[in-house]
Image (spheres, helix red, strand yellow):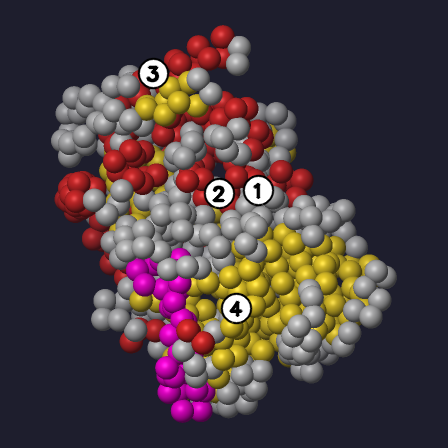
Amino acid sequence: MKAYVRFFFFLAIISLISCESVDNKKISYPETVCGDTIDTYFGIEVPDPYRWLEDDNSDETKAWVMEQNHLTDSLLAEIPFRQKIEDRLTQIWDYPKYGLPFKKGDYWYYYKNDGLQAQAVVYQMKNLDGDPVVFLDPNTFSDDGTVSLSSLSFSKNGAFCTYSISKGGSDWKEIFVMEVETKNKLQDHLKWVKFSGMSWYKDGFYYTRFEAPKDGEELKGVNENSKVYYHRAGTSQDADKMIYEDTENPKYSWYINTTEDERFLILSGYNPSARGNALYYKKAKKKKADFIPIQEDFENKTWVLDNEGNELFVMTNKDAPRNRVYKFNVNKPSETSEVIPQSTDVLNNVGMAGGKLLVSYMHDASSKAYVYNLDGGLEHQIELPGIGSISGFSGEKDSDLAFFSYTSFTFPKMAFKYNIKTNKAEVFRESGVDFDMENYETKQVFYSSKDGTKIPMFIVYKKGIELNGNNPTLLYGYGGFNISLTPYFSISNLILLENGGVYALPNIRGGGEYGEEWHQAGTQLNKQNVFDDFIAAAEYLIENGYTSSEKLAIRGGSNGGLLVGACMTQRPDLFQVAIPQVGVMDMLRFHKFTIGYYWVPDYGSSDDAEQFDYLLKYSPLHNIHDGTCYPATLITTADHDDRVVPAHSFKFAAELQSKQSCNNPTLIRIETKAGHGAGKSTNQRIKEASDIWAFMFYNMGVEVYSEKE
């Protein structure tokens, strides 16, 4: 490495050597012991003084968590309008929410939350117009609501149901089996399952599990040597038959799915250092036959949609960064035919029902939907309520009915029933929310990022808003892993809107809104593009009068937490409030925890010299400096987060508390008995949202009111 480059990095990290707390006039933070751990990367020493906080099971870390939570809780409780926010959120949260109906065997099923139930309940009906009865109620799984329903799967004949649960929001799952007619739970109890479905074949199902971790090591790097098993209903896990393992590549993950008619097994493999997956198939009845490759190089994302007889329909981004669909006959696998070629828009989702392909595209980050025949002929465009997002397309091959959900910023998520023959869609179940959506509007703008790239951004606000630069504004982002942020309804965001606020959602690079090329433009040595896009969005909002730096907050979770951490350390002058949630904050060590090594294709790795140099430049933990006034910051994480381990947030909070040069608070809110986000009860979500809005408004100097007062 050149001398001047090494000197630059020395300046960038030298401030980490001191752990002396600044004299904060308003807040006395809990003492955080400064250790002497130093790592050496390619000749550069990088201190890691709070390494001890990585041990979430130590008495010292537990005491630190308790003290930090006590401080945060006491300060948030002093905000005069915090309870008012929680009361209003509880009021508008209380409306029925329906999931998509689906048929299995002789019954129809759907999820429904009456309003404030901790978790949605699964209902069963004899027909779509019949009277629903409770089939499975996750609210009975635990007294405190910390055990949640993760997934549900039925045997082809509908006789058996498998369901998985998560305890405390963990990614670890446990699987149980029940008899549908009697609703009796069988003896089956499967453990140490993670990121796995339950794919039925005859009287059993395929699933993927890992070896049991040692006590206290559930959050550590134990996600290796995944194995695919077949479990027969009514038996113990010890009797399961191991179907597939890859002893030569212990970090690869493997999964088996079945086609709807159970004729084919589909084997998918994921290599943590690659951007795509491997894909194989074979006829299910030929148990001893080898899997036949569809794609082996892990270079592209490819998956089987389903089959029609001997024809397999495949969706891929190979030679098509915005995706395409092709098919082949298993008797002539080398002869493929294009069904839906790549378009100018991103092919987002394809469902097969009623002998048709139900297709959704993304056009400038919002949905359009069409019906094609199995040869790729366009038959209909599905009329949607407006600019928004659809998901689903569930249905059966022999039925003319399909279902999808639709939502937008001002339209609650609803399930729609779609008749394929008549091309008519109607709401499956009506639900209302105590909020006048007609008073609000959504605008899409395109702004220029630092390098001139045009970035789309949705802006939501009350009609007639005055662009005087004084509106409290939340800028939300993600920018990674090919994940697209499209219009969605948020009950929580209604607090912002009805208090005169602005919600802004930019579709920054790193996401999938414009296909794989857009994704790649925000990965590894291009990651700074993501932060530049987000910063440019903030500057656009200020320049156009929506808000000012004094009234601007930024928020994001997971990879979005990294986004917030990087932007608040690069441009601390631009934001008044920062809310990094379950963020990846230590970019030098992220790959050493749980499944972090699967993020290397997006981030790069500090094990590589060039990538280390790049990561160190923006790693939030390593770019906090003395003498800088950072935004008022509320960090959120959870003690059971085994995806982005809480140590990221712990270390970032400790570092920021020790270096903050002004009176802006740095607080950390650590949810107990919760994980990365999924599985939280309704009450947990309401209280977390109330804390975030109260913190944001209070530190902007905004007095909260309510239209209902």
In front of the other: label 4 or label 1?
4
Could you tell which of marks 3 and 4 lies nearer the N-terminus? Answer: 3
> What numbered label is drawn on residue 273?
1
Taking the image as shown, residue 252 lies to the left or right of residue 343, namely left
Taking the image as shown, residue 303 lies to the left or right of residue 479, namely right
Residue assigned mark 3: 14
**Percent position of residue 282, x then y:** 70, 69
Tags 2 and 1 touching, CB below 8 Å: yes
User: Whole-Å distance between the Cαs marked 2 and 4?
Assistant: 25 Å
Kindly identify the residue that appears in the image at 34 percent across and 39 percent down.
648
Q: Amino acid type of disc 3?
A: Ile
Disc 2 on helix, strand or loop? helix
Residue assigned mark 2: 597
In front of the other: label 3 or label 4?
4
**Percent position of residue 216, x then y:** 27, 52
Residue 52 shown in magenta = no
In front of the other: label 2 or label 4?
4
Taking the image as shown, residue 51 lies to the left or right of residue 315, namely left
